[in-house]
Amino acid sequence: MTPKSGSSPARGLALCVAAAAAIVMLDGVMHVLMAQSPFGGPPGGAEPQIGGIVGWLLAKQSEFYREMSSTIRAAKSDGSAVWTLLAISFAYGIFHAAGPGHGKAVISSYLVANQETARRGIALSFASALMQSLVAVAIVAICAWLLNATAATMCGAEKKIEIVSYALIAAFGARLVWIKGGGFIRALQAQQPVPAMALAVHHDHAGHGHDHPHHDHSHVHANVAHHDLEHHHDDHDHGHVHDEHCGHSHGPDPSELAGPGGWRRGFGAIFAVGIRPCSGAILVLVFALAQGLFWAGIAATFVMGLGTAITVAAIAVIAVSAKDLARRLSGGTEGGGALVMRGLEFGAAGLVLLFGVGLLFGYLAAERVTCL
Amino acid sequence: MAMRWWLGLLLLTGVLALAAGAAQAHPHVWITAKSELIYAPDGSLTGVRHAWTFDDMFSTYALQGIETKTKGAYSREELAPLAQTNVESLKEFGFFTFARADGKKEKFQEPVDYFLEYKDAALTLHFILPLKTPMKPKELAVEVFDPAFFIDFKFADKDPVKLVAAPATCQMKFQRPNDGTANAQKLGEQNFLGGDNSNYGAMFANKITVECP
């Protein structure tokens, strides 16, 4: 295979095939899951009701949420009710994230797509939840408190932000797919008996062709790089000194989380997910404002975010652990194993894109703000 | 090797799908509904009259930014613009009211006689949905629910549904979503990414059936 004539169409074709495969696989899994109750309860049992874990989560969540309004009212005359409010908000946050919401799905997929640590997963979950809370407070503070805008105006703003958020997730996913597609193709090609020289030339070519995403790519693969000769070679084409450091550190040290490039790496995910506020938080904030207890609403919003972050972080850790397990099961980093891992990362990147597109075009209509 | 390959793949897909599968809706607004089916003197059904009471939190939210003469009191006139916004927004969702007459889907016209009422810290939206053409179906089914389940519809405990001036032979039955009679199996027919996910709320449908032999 000559690098110039073969690589580009081959890459494109393989990308399409892989994307189609990922979609088919995902769709199949969804079908199986959805044919049963969402968490795999008995399909079509004697009592096909809203039961199981989802039903319970929904019921608990509604319970907590509906208690919030009465607690805020109570807090007007009895200050200690604020503590109850915070406790309820915390519980609501935990249950809220355990049930619906695309945030954890996007974050988990992002973590799997990238070679991220569990610790970073936790950091990302907390950062995006914090941003969600901040956006909710900002919307209500500006629209309702400062401008005294109507609910329709506020909800309209919420809807616009929502569309931006979904578009960002789609764009973010597309970028991941592009980057991970490259890694997957290279892993595929590494499977074929290609002369070493040709491979080297080809890799160089790919590296130049995608200068921009490559920057991220090298970061992302840095900590497996030294296991994987192919990638080591590839990544260090344009690698930075910083990568070298990450590549050889095993335990996640703090600089990886907050140091230069640390936050920037995950910022895309934080921003895309965090910019969309939770409708529930906005309702609580407006309600608290109307009761003259805006500060209590703000406190409740942040505590709610804390609860959400804990659940999302737990799911993120599970996703990262599952990937580690998958890596071990698939035989680590030699030949086929590397292909599996690149394939998985590519699939996860595809999921982020699918979520974004699905949310944007309303296939996941379940997650739309309804303005009345 | 191949075995481990698939095992790893399966495991991960499972986790991701679980995370994704849980991406279902949950209510933010609760409505306590009362509905009446209205019949003309000749015995034909003309429309549905709804009275939907919003929960405490949403009522307050909806009233945000509305100026009144007396603080905390909202007259029907002061609430008229909001009622207008409400019915206009509801149009996009088919007024969450889905009718079938003898198995055929029926459409409603624009709502009439709509107004909001504020009482005991709660807003109630009243409106009438006239049928495109009055009819005399042998079997009528009217479902009230939000397919996206952003709104949780619960019918009032007392007098949830009434027939107004219906022929004496007509028999009405009302099913709540949680009494085991609703067709929750609809969930099984869903296709998460196929676009049918929007019908998730059908599990939470309130179903009114009227048989006029």
Image (spheres, coloured by chain):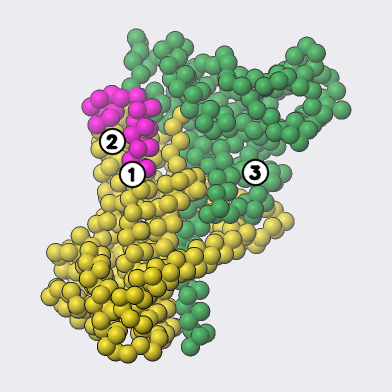
Chain colours: A yellow, B green
Residue drawn at the location 59% of the way across and 36% of the way down: B145
Q: Is residue A147 magenta?
A: yes
Image coordinates for residue A78, horizontal then vertical, percent: 32, 33
**Residue A139, disc:** 2
Q: Quadrant of the N terminus of chain A?
A: bottom left
- Residue at 19% from the left image edge and 77% from the top image edge: A237
In this view, A331 is above or below A207: below
- CA–CA distance in space, label 3 to label 2: 36 Å
Q: Is residue B24 visible?
A: yes
User: Which chain is mark 2 on?
Assistant: A
Mark 3 lies on residue: B178
Please, what is the three-letter code of the amino acid marked with disc 3? Asn
Question: Where does residue A118 sit, x and y in percent of width and height?
Answer: 31, 69
- The segment highlighted magenta reads A142-164
Q: Nearer the viewer, residue B40 or B75?
A: B40
Residue B167, numbered label: none
Q: Which is more toward the observer, B11 or A176?
A: A176
Inspect the image, locate mark 1, and give the three-letter code of the amino acid beneath it. Val
Mark 1 nearby-residue class (10 Å; few <14, some 14–19, many ≥20): some
Check disc 1 and report the residue beneath it. Answer: A164
Please provide percent x and percent y for residue B77. Answer: 44, 10
Same-chain status of marks 2 and 1: yes
The location of residue A103, given as percent across then percent down, is 38, 54
In the picture shown, does residue B188 fall above or below A241? above
Disc 3 or disc 2, which is closer to the eye?
2
Q: Chain of mark 3?
A: B
Front residue of A18/A130: it is A18
Extreme-front residue of the structure: A5
